[in-house]
Image (tube, helix red, strand yellow):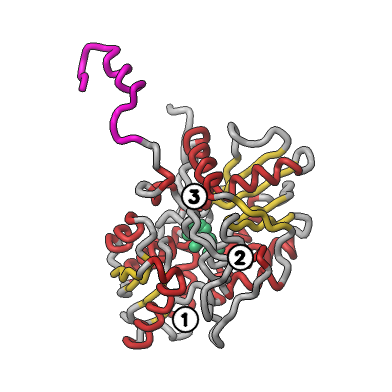
Amino acid sequence: MASRQTEGRGRRYSSIVDTIGDTPVIRINRIGPKNATIYVKFEAFNPAASVKDRLAISIIEAAEKDGRLKPGQTVVEATSGNTGIGLAMVCAAKGYPLVITMADSFSIERRRLMRFLGAKVVLTPRAEKAVGMYKKAVELAEKNDWFLASQFETPDNADIHEATTAREILADFDGERLDYFVTGYGTGGTVSGVSRVLRKERPDTKIILTEPDNAALIASGVAQERTPSHAPESGHPAWAPHPIQGWTPDFIPYVLQEAIDGAYYDDLLPVAGADGIAWSKRLAAEEGILTGVSGGSTFAVSMKVAETAPEGSVILCMLPDTGERYLSTPLFDGIPEDMTDEEEALSKSTPGFQM
Ligand code: PMP
């Protein structure tokens, strides 16, 4: 008998979409701080491997329920990738055609994954940034009478994190210490939804929000101009290109505005993309936890929080997606295809199969 046994989940799933959520909280053992314990909530366990699967099923099922989305109607959305991949998974399972608009600066594997999942991907010039891809999605929706998913404005975004992500955290830390919850923002759905619940049910937990140090939109204090439908009127002046894909578009999303206006976070800390990349690499190589740049960045901030946290503190760090989504990006720079000198030496150290 093997030393590890599993029991099965005790149920059979009627669709891939029913496997979304209930992601594991995992302790960091080797690279964590001495004085505190860091746990990560690892969203790569979702079926399409990111936190955005939650948002995708929420948007589609809410719109099905109130008739905004008709059977067979095309869904359209502007996305930096994970929302598109999540929507592609949900739309494939439920039989809706999907069109994604995306700036051509996001990783190649994101586009190919969406197309592999049956979606169409319309690229927009990177110079037009997130606002450009958003405007393209609106145009296509209006011209063709498609359903626009509106991840940056829809209440179905934060609501699903209130109903699932936050509830999972409460259950997993029931009766246990939880001193800090650390997250970044893309749409702000995670921070707005989780914080609604933590503020009420775990008022002693400090909520730490983070954003790229070179695109510190919230820290700038400059308000976002919006259209009557809450969409951004134009790009935010504090934005600059940053390497943390999925975080901080070039505007402050309406979904995030709730967390700003409601003072849902206790501290706002900047992080350098390079630090996020470095910690993502260490999470993979020293903990076996394969997460993307946003996960590494959230972890970098969690390590920073630990530096001044009281002895014995417990920190929960969101890891939004899988590192496999970044093979063609700077995250994998320096990871060679060919054998290194050390590997060559190993190869030559025995007689067989030398290249
Ligand atoms: N990290 C990555 C890689 C993402 O794709 C996203 C979502 N765009 C986030 C973090 C942030 O999540 P949220 O939209 O809930 O703020």
For label 2, the SS is helix
Q: Residues within 10 Å of mark 1 (few under 14, many from 20)?
A: few
Mark 1 CB within 8 Å of ligand 1: no
Determine if residue 169 is in view: yes
Query: Label 3: how many residues lie within 10 Å, few (<14), some (14-19) or many (20+)?
Result: many
The residues bearing labels 3 and 1 have C-alpha atoms spaced at a distance of 35 Å
Residue at disc 3, secondary structure:
helix
Magenta stretch contains residue 348: yes
Relative to 161, residue 298 above or below: above
Rendered view: 139 above or below 100: below
Badge 3 residue CB within 8 Å of ligand 1 = yes
Can residue 51 be seen from the camera position used here? no
Q: Which span is picked out in magenta?
A: 336-355
Tell me the SS state at disc 1: helix
Q: Please report whichever mark, 3 or 1, sits nearer to the chain's N-terminal start.
A: 1
Residue depicted at x 36% and y 58%? 110
State the residue in front, 2 or 331: 331
Left or right? Give the position of 225 relative to 268: left
- What is the x, y in percent for residue 139? 37, 83
Q: Is residue 156 above or below residue 80?
A: below
Q: Nearer the viewer, residue 123 or 11?
A: 123
Q: Earlier in the sequence, mark 3 or mark 2?
A: 2
Task: State the CA–CA distance, disc 1 to disc 2.
Answer: 35 Å
Q: Main secondary structure of the magenta part?
A: loop
| Residue at the disc numbered 1 | 65
The residue shown at (28%, 66%) is: 118
Q: What residue is shown with label 3?
A: 293
> How far is the residue under mark 3 from the one under mark 2?
19 Å
Q: Which residue is mark 2?
A: 217
Residue 218: percent from left, percent from top = 64, 65
Instruction: Give the x, y percent position of residue 138.
Output: 41, 81
